[in-house]
Amino acid sequence: MPFNPQHPSHLLRTELGTIRKQFGIGCAVALVYPHTYAVGMSNLGVHFIYERLNRRSDCLCERVFWNLDPLVSVESQRPLTDFNLIAFSVSFELDYLHLLQVLERARIPLFASERIGGRYPIIIAGGISVTMNPYPIVPFVDAVVLGDGEGVIDQLIDAYQSSEGEKSKFLAEIAKIPGVVVAQALTQRPGPDTACPLKPNIVAPLTPPPCRTVIFTPHTEFASMCLIEIARGCPHKCTFCYTGNSPLPYRVHELAQIQAIIDQNRQYTDRFGLVSSAVGRHPQIEALCDYALSKGVRLSFSSLHVADIGPTILRALAMSKQRTLTIAPESGDEALRRSLGKPVADEQIIQLIRKAIEQGIPSVKLYFLIGLPNESLEQCLSIISLVKQLHQHFTAASRRKTTIGTMSINVGIFVPKSGTPLSKDGMMGIRALRERIRLLHRELSRLSNVTLSMPSAHQAAAQTLLSLGGPIVSEFLLAALRHNGSWRTALREKTRDSKSTWLDLSQSLKNS
């Protein structure tokens, strides 16, 4: 039988490090990542929870992913209804729809109020999207976990064992755990001028060992690479980003802990990915790069800020045979960049790209945002002039190396995030955004050796509602589910609804 990338048993055969436990030994947890296997297995939170739960003798944890067919666990190919607890880990707001699709395919009632009598698993959701805004999924889950998972995970299983799986007793017990909120308590979201009563669980300092890859699989973007979390949170205060403005502070793992993970996993791979929102800000990043290179391993970095990229990081990228430097200028306008908390001059970007090419890194990937608050059309289109300027220097430097790589341009749309300085600014109207996208595509698509990735205005509008909305947004999710995942159709249906709550909420989509 040919390999099927969506079949659990086929994927299982290609994994290294899978934990297999006998079903029925204790609390059975289905860890569900509501996205594809490839994306889910690149998420360190999945690896951490999986290992932490399976370390216990009174618990087993098996993985389920949204795109599996059939929809059963990877390890034992059991349906979700065979498990005691279903734990969703949600990284993206749009995956709230996938959460509903998973429940529907598993023939589990969508609404928590319909799952009575102990016939169905208890459903808990966590992850960064849930921490930012759990309200859209309140009617569908029994409880949410906000913030860091360390400490909470074991307490959840302890509570299940002490309550003997009786749902009401279990929910009463976990309501006492910091960072855990029973969904019934989330009936109404506070207004924009009211402090949010939800307090995430915060682990500071971080407890060793660092989160890292537990299961190796060739079927991810980071195939055969060991990912290591070197820090959590972000020291940068970009005004549009939740991570740097959240209650969760910037915390780092010690150098010796990271070195130990490299040493332990060199038998499996020579490729290591350092994961953090600001890899270059780790206080010992240069020593870490030097250590890795001295051991003959190759490094990649999850996120680099222009101002943080020094000679040591560039040398580590080049010696690791990385072919692409990824940075995020966000805007082509320097003044707008500064207002976002990214005080980076055009000349800094030019020099960085030139140095990267000289070091032997042939390609560059650039991320931009459009539809920013108070962004004029001229400021938006300054992306074109900056990219053309960078393209000239990129081409000239590449010709001197006799190898021309690719310049990838990724354009995203500003989506206001709860808890950020720009959370009240709303999203630019869909018509205005589509016109800006058209103008950018017309000009940038003419450049040689340039690839473009342009955004969907309707997806950004859906993301805005899910980022800012309260429990009423669950109706929007149900509409998208009814319309086979069409955000555009769901938006048309719900933003034209006569209910005052929807009229208020749709104001966040300016002139759409």
Image: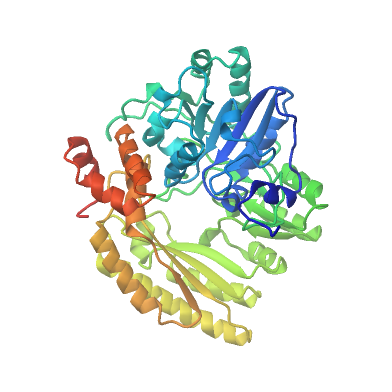
Whether residue 222 is visible, yes or no, is yes
Residue at the location (74% across, 50% down)? 13
Residue at the location (63% across, 16% down)? 161
From this view, report whether residue 319 is shown above or below residue 93: below
Whether residue 252 is visible, yes or no, is no
Residue 33 is situated, as x and y percent measured from the top left of the image, at 55, 42
Residue 483 is situated, as x and y percent measured from the top left of the image, at 34, 48
Total numbered labels: 0
Looking at the image, the residue that sits furthest to the front is: 1
Residue at the location (71% across, 55% down)? 272
- Tell me where residue 256 sits by quadrant: top right
From this view, report whether residue 404 is shown above or below residue 428: below
From this view, report whether residue 27 is shown above or below residue 35: above
The quarter of the picture where the C terminus appears is bottom left
Looking at the image, the residue that sits furthest to the right is: 267
Q: Nearer the viewer, residue 283 or 437?
A: 437
Q: Is residue 506 left or right of residue 469?
A: left
- Tell me where residue 445 sits by quadrant: bottom left
Q: Is residue 277 left or right of residue 331?
A: right
Q: Nearer the viewer, residue 154 or 41?
A: 41
Q: Is residue 148 left or right of residue 26?
A: left
Residue 47 is situated, as x and y percent measured from the top left of the image, at 65, 41
Task: Report the coloring of the rendering.
Answer: rainbow
Residue at the location (54% across, 76% down)? 406
Residue 203 is situated, as x and y percent measured from the top left of the image, at 58, 31
Q: Nearer the viewer, residue 446 or 471?
A: 471
The quarter of the picture where the N terminus appears is bottom right
From this view, report whether residue 389 is shown above or below residue 479: below
